[in-house]
Amino acid sequence: MPEVLNWQIGRKMSYPYEESRPRRQFAMVMDLNKCIACQTCTVSCKTTWTRGRGQEYIFWNNVETKPYGGYPLAWDVRILERLGPQRWEGGRYAGQTVFEAAPPGETVLGWFPSAPHWMHPNLGEDEPRGRVKRGTYLSGLPHAVWMFYLPRICNHCTYPACLAACPRKAIYKRPEDGVVLVDQSRCRGYRECIRACPYKKTHFNLTTRVAEKCIGCYPALEQNLQNMCVTACIGRIRLAGYLTPPRKDGSPPEIEEGDMQNPIDYLVWKRRLALPLYPQFGLEPNVYYLPPVHVPLPYLRQMFGPKVEEAVDTYRRMMKEPEKERELAGLLCLFGSTYRVIHRFRVSATHAHGYDEEGREIVRVPQREPSYVRPFYDPERGVYRHNVP
Ligand code: SF4
Ligand code: SF4
Ligand code: F3S
């Protein structure tokens, strides 16, 4: 098998195809500190793309409550257990990826969910870890009792396991933006993609008998518009854009410094705040998460890799002293602020600005929402406003 470079695990690994990176990689960042599991993303995706026959239990986008939720049931626990010990030596992953741990004769270590696994997309919702006793929520950080919401879409991986496993070569990665698609005219329903994807983001349509998956809303991307799940998001936790590929040796690319910066590069490469989900699987996923700061570190380390501690520290610092982290705090204000893809951003004294590919301003958001506190007693109307703080 060819050896390819996976910067997220800090080393080369075996993969069935040669390394071939797209010209630029579609990527999404989600801030897990802000997700409220309203499922608006799920519904917006479903009503746009998957409301046909055979798609009743198919959710290209889902939001699950961690640690107990999972769609399909226990998708991550099952693959983590199969993978065995996952040791990191600094930034280098010393365990096996799903490609390296594949049984003889197979390309990927996988498992095949059965129908009941898909039938309860939101099982475990709001179930916390730890016993809830009076006062437990107030006993400091990390919380003794905790949970968080994890929104998930296909990661449009650099090394997709679905693509690697398909005997029909029916799955491909677009060279122009790295979006991973199923060519349904080639698909013969072998379902190896479903067995292989560790994130379980390929689905089988029982009516059409072919595979399907999140398409990264490519018709929108081609118009320079952000994805449905991004623009519909109530919590404004998402930002879509493009990640610059790493250098040949896996080190961060040269990032333009200065006034205007690529927001995805800023969060992933420069601030190292946005982290991939289960990098140890070896797929180089391209959905990145700002980790939830109230969750115990061992759990976060397993989920987001060894850089999570630094990311949590940065996020906490930003919350505590936003003036010192004005650029970062300003960028987070741009999440969910426009339908259009923000290629560059800049933070001025009062506003965060987003720009298109040509450098034209497309959005401007105040760093602080103006607020007006009305008096408790309104003499003109002779009323008390009891809900005024
Ligand atoms: Fe394929 Fe799964 Fe990666 Fe999506 S997340 S590209 S379905 S391997
Ligand atoms: Fe659905 Fe588009 Fe979001 Fe994919 S990117 S989950 S297709 S809304
Ligand atoms: Fe290939 Fe998956 Fe279809 S393995 S043939 S894309 S069901």
Image (spheres, helix red, strand yellow):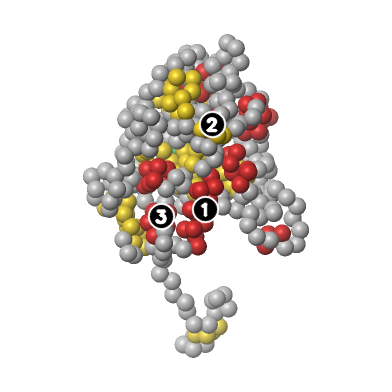
Q: Amino acid at mark 1?
A: Asp
Residue behind mark 1 = 313
Label 3 element class: helix
- Mark 3 in CB contact with mark 1 (< 8 angstroms): no
- State which mark lies toward you, 2 or 3: 2
Classify 10 Å Cα crowding around label 3: few (below 14), some (14-19), many (20 and above): many
Nearer to us of marks 3 and 1 is 1
Question: In screen coordinates, is 379 left or right of 125?
Answer: left
Q: Earlier in the sequence, mark 3 or mark 1?
A: 1
Distance Cα–Cα, label 3 vs label 1: 13 Å
Q: Residue furthest front?
A: 89
The amino acid at mark 2 is Tyr
Return the disc, 1 or 2, that comes first in the chain's sequence: 2
Residue annotated with mark 3: 328
Q: Residue at x 66, y 46 (%)?
A: 125
Residue shown at 47%/14% (left/top)? 1
Residue at the top extreme, as displayed: 105
- Give residue 42's position: percent from left, percent from top: 53, 42
- Please tell me which residue is depicted at 63% across the width and 23% down the height of the picture: 111
The x, y position of residue 363, in whole percent, is 32, 54
Judging by the rendered image, the residue that carries numbered circle 2 is 93
- Callout 1 crowding tier (Cα within 10 Å): few <14, some 14–19, many ≥20: few
**Residue 106 appears anywhere in the view:** yes
Percent x, y of residue 256: 29, 44
Q: How many marks?
A: 3
Q: Which mark is first along the chain, 3 or 2?
A: 2
Examine the rendered structure and indicate whether residue 58 appears above or below residue 334: above
